Amino acid sequence: MSQSPNHDHATSTARLPTPDNRNRPMFSLGLLVATAGVNAHLIDNGIDPTPFIRQHYFGLWGDVPPEDAQENDFSVLNGFRVLSSYQMAEERVWIIAAADRSSTTMLFPHEY
């Protein structure tokens, strides 16, 4: 997931609250969309995506490695794409906010 390996995370992420204190939106979602596959999966399994979208919106990145969580924090502060990963009814679903924050897409990893 790393987008730009030559930046200093120690100073870049200092302005974001720690994950335990993230109780407000961290960035704009823009237009929220889902691929047809994810939409069908949500409907077929009776899944409300709202809690997952809220976690993403609040900077709680789900099941990503620590270095990717750190990259997401950097990306929030610097206007890069942000990727969260959540398990939904035994399927991995990514939520990706575009760098320009015009849209946020829910998709399966194989659809990326």
Image (cartoon, rainbow, N blue to C red):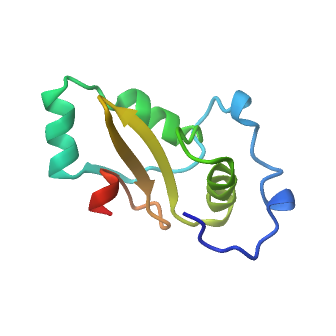
Q: Nearer the viewer, residue 77 or 43?
A: 43
In the figure, is residue 60 to the left or right of 13? left
Residue 72 coordinates in the image, percent (x, y): 62, 55
Q: How many marks?
A: 0
Snapshot quadrant of residue 58: top right
Spot occupied by residue 88 in the image (x, y as percentages of width and height): 33, 32
Residue 74 x/y as whole percent? 69, 59
In the visual, does 41 lie left or right of 30?
Answer: left
Please tell me which residue is depicted at 31% across the width and 32% down the height of the picture. 90
Is residue 12 positioned above or below 23 on the image?
below
Residue that appears at 66% across and 58% down: 71
Q: Nearer the viewer, residue 101 or 60?
A: 60
Name the outermost residue toward the top: 46
The residue at 18%/41% (across/down) is: 39
- Of all residues, the one furthest to the front in this rendering is 90
For residue 76, above or below residue 61: below
| Quadrant of the drawing holding the C terminus | bottom left
Quarter where residue 38 is shown? top left
Q: Note whether 11 is above or below 107 in the view shown.
A: below
Residue drawn at 70 percent across, 53 percent down = 70
